[in-house]
């Protein structure tokens, strides 16, 4: 009897081990750290526990640029991850990387579980779709710039905490009062090229580049040296000279200036909200981006930032089936709503937005729907977004020239002219490389 029991136990153990080893492993490289990284790990853990067939392994690989570079290098070395998170400016580069990626919609259709682009918010789906309307990557952490302000600092400066600045001149006036009240910094911004050039153009319904900002062809060229951009760069440079605008650096390095309470106003990604709420020691206000009221058509709509998930080629059918299942899990109303509510990123699916609205979340958390409202408009050829090759490198050029402009070392027009000249040289090189 004992021998029979041991035999059965051993057989059960073997069966259990066999089942465990039968699970298909999926490697997911991402750029989320801090509170966002914790949420990514939580989502992955929930998916892994929800079914026995697939195990997703989430691996943090550094900043957006570092993660993208690591993924590209791994593919060239024949050891690419299955899923790679790529920031939105890498979209054109990934799309034209021949043989490197598998379009998400095509993958899901072959797996027998189609991902429908109509399930996503229009502005989100269109950005990550091919000219034929098919999804090429999976929308995930989509953000858009919003205007944050420190209500405690506003109150101390004698500003109305419920009426934040709506125009750029109003921002300048509020910044003066904040500085006069003892604030170290009036206004700052993160991601300067994304917010002060790309989104600025869409918000004012003017072209950032020709050919519908690159959506219309590889021969698109930059147009950021036009009068409205020069006006805005000079405006910010004048604020910097007056001590009311503090340049906080490239990428998201300026976050610390606002979260620490040094700056009273801040334009940044809606996805920054989680970090501000966790680490900021003040009452937070959120509003729409400032604009110039005399510009016809402004404000129009903002464009998305953040990142999407790309799938590398040369993987097994089992892996693609598992990735499809994981992506469908991410797009479920419950997951999309929870991600949006917990991070500040927009709910990428319509169902996620409706579920959030139905729950009363927006009423309980004023300002959390600002990002959705900014995106919720019929886009124009100027406001759909930007799809240019070498855009990360172009941003580096733009950031470098803006640093010169804000420091008063070059004029706004001269700096913008350099951006266009050097940026267009990169676009010409990219155009030749994909022919």
Image (cartoon, grey):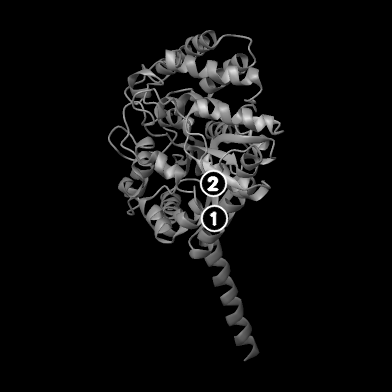
Crowding near the residue tagged with mark 1, few <14, some 14–19, many ≥20 C-alpha atoms within 10 Å:
some
Pointer 2: what residue?
Answer: 28
State the SS at label 2.
strand
The answer to which image quadrant residue 2 occupies is: bottom right
Comparing 317 with 206, the one in front is 206
Q: Are marks 1 and 2 in contact (CB under 8 Å)?
A: yes
State the SS at label 1.
helix
Crowding near the residue tagged with mark 2, few <14, some 14–19, many ≥20 C-alpha atoms within 10 Å:
many
Comparing 420 with 84, the one in front is 420
Left or right relative to 343: residue 139: left
Pointer 1: what residue?
Answer: 44
Q: CA distance from mark 1 to mark 2?
A: 10 Å
At 43% from the left edge and 17% from the top edge, which residue is drawn?
228
Q: Is residue 402 above or below residue 270?
A: above
Identity of the residue furthest to the left in this view = 132
Specify which label sits upstream in the sequence, 1 or 2.
2
What percent of the width, then of the height, locates residue 422? Answer: 51, 11
């Amino acid at each position: 009897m004992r021998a029979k029991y041991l035999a059965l136990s051993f057989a059960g153990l073997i069966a259990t081990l066999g089942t465990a080893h039968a699970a298909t492993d999926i490697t997911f490289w991402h750029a989320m750290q801090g509170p966002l990284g914790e949420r990514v790990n939580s989502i992955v853990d929930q998916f892994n526990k929800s079914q026995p067939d697939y195990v997703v392994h989430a691996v943090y690989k550094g900043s957006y640029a570092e993660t993208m570079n690591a993924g590209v290098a791994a593919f060239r070395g024949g050891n690419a991850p299955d899923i790679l998170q790529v920031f939105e400016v890498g979209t054109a580069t990934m799309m034209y990387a021949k043989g490197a990626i598998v379009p998400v919609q095509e993958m899901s259709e072959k797996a027998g579980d189609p991902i429908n682009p109509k399930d996503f918010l229009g502005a989100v789906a269109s950005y990550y779709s091919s000219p034929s309307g098919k999804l090429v990557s999976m929308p995930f952490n989509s953000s858009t710039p919003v205007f944050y302000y420190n209500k405690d600092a506003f109150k101390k400066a004698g500003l109305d905490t419920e009426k934040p600045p709506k125009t750029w001149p109003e921002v300048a006036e509020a910044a003066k009062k904040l500085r006069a009240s003892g604030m170290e910094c009036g206004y700052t911004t993160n991601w300067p090229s994304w917010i002060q050039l790309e989104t600025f153009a869409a918000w004012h319904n003017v072209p950032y580049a020709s050919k519908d900002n690159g959506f219309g062809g590889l021969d698109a060229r930059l147009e950021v040296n036009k009068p409205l951009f020069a006006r805005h760069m000079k405006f910010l440079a004048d604020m910097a000279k007056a001590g009311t605008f503090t340049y906080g650096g490239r990428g998201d390095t300026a976050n610390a200036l606002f979260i620490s309470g040094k700056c009273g106003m801040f334009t940044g990604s809606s996805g920054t909200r989680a970090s501000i709420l966790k680490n900021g020691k003040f009452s937070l206000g959120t509003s729409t981006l400032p604009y110039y009221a005399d510009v016809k058509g402004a404000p129009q709509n903002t464009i998305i930032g953040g990142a999407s998930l790309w799938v590398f080629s040369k993987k097994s059918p089992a892996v693609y089936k598992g990735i499809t299942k994981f992506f469908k899990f991410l797009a479920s109303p419950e997951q999309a709503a929870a991600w949006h509510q917990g991070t500040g990123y927009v709910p990428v699916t319509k169902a996620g937005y409706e579920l959030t609205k139905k729950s009363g979340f927006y009423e309980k958390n004023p300002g959390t729907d600002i990002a959705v409202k900014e995106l919720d408009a019929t886009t124009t050829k100027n406001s759909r977004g930007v799809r240019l090759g070498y855009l990360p490198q172009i941003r580096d050029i733009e950031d470098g020239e803006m640093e010169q402009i804000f420091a008063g070392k070059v004029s706004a027009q001269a700096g913008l002219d350099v951006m266009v000249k050097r940026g267009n040289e990169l676009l010409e090189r990219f155009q030749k490389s994909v022919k």
